[in-house]
Image: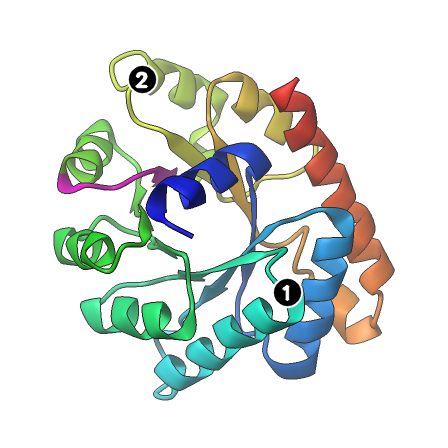
Amino acid sequence: MNESEIRMWLNRYKIIAICRKIYGSDLERLTEALAIGGVRMIEVTFDQADPEHLEKTARAIELVKRVSGGNVLPGAGTVMTAEQVDAAKSAGAFYIISPNTDEAVIRRTKENGLVSIPGAMTPSEIAAAHNYGADFVKLFPTSQLGPDYVKAISAPISHVKLVATGGITEDNLPTYLKLGMVGAGISGRLTDKKLIAEGNFAEISRRAAAFAAIAGGEQK
């Protein structure tokens, strides 16, 4: 899948489930549950504090790709170095997501033929990320900034495609999509560790279906 096809995938399906410190059989069952609900993108994050984060995240990306059989596109999250970009690419990631805007990370992402989604908050950061070559910009933390902030900054930077991340729920997602944001990264509601520990993957599938329905409705 080339960069254009990956961009089209995100524009169509919109929802990225953010997986932090979830590995092995838990991640396998989570991937299956999310796919059943219609979520077609999973971001596996690097745990920067873990000395084994390169190997662990690479294995997790490979697992998502294998389990989903091509129905879910894995990406890497909390990517903060060029080395992590390379590790994610080798493992089969299709897109690179960061909490910040780092020119070296963005440029390495594009050199690897991957889709770049750096994080930014201010208009200056958003414009810089776009100018460095980002395909989308993750507005973080979206819910803390609020709809009025999104509306205010959207006028002068309407050419930048924004992805909502941070505190996104079934209740507020429609608002952000109506404001023109192209998608959302979602952690708590879709990767709830309490539900995973309980083995309640049916509830995760239900939530995934609710988010997918909102995203699908936006396409009509």
Picture layout, residue 193 above or below residue 178: below
Q: Position of residue 12 (x, y in %)?
A: 55, 33
The earlier-in-sequence mark between 1 and 2 is 1
Q: Position of residue 124 (x, y in %)?
A: 17, 31
Q: Which residue is located at x 14 percent, y 42 percent? A: 132
Identify the amino acid type marked 2.
Ser
| Residue 135 within the segment the image draws in magenta | yes
Q: Is residue 7 left or right of residue 114?
A: right
Give the camera-side residue of 123 and 27. 27
Q: Is residue 110 left or right of residue 3?
A: left
> Can you tell which quarter of the image residue 214 is in?
top right
Give the camera-side residue of 14 and 65. 65
Q: Residues within 10 Å of mark 1 (few under 14, many from 20)?
A: few
Q: Which residues are magenta?
A: 132-138
Label 1 vs label 2, nearer the camera: 1
Picture layout, residue 41 above or below residue 64: above
Q: Please name the residue that numbered disc 1 is placed on.
A: 69
Q: Is residue 143 visible?
A: no
Q: Residue furthest top?
A: 155
Q: Is residue 16 visible?
A: yes
Q: Residues within 10 Å of mark 2 (few under 14, many from 20)?
A: few
Q: What is the spatial separation of the Cα atoms under label 1 and label 2, in whole angstroms?
A: 36 Å
Give the camera-side residue of 14 and 199. 14
| Residue 106 within the segment the image draws in magenta | no
Q: Position of residue 156 (x, y in %)?
A: 25, 14
Question: Which label number is shown at residue 158?
Answer: 2
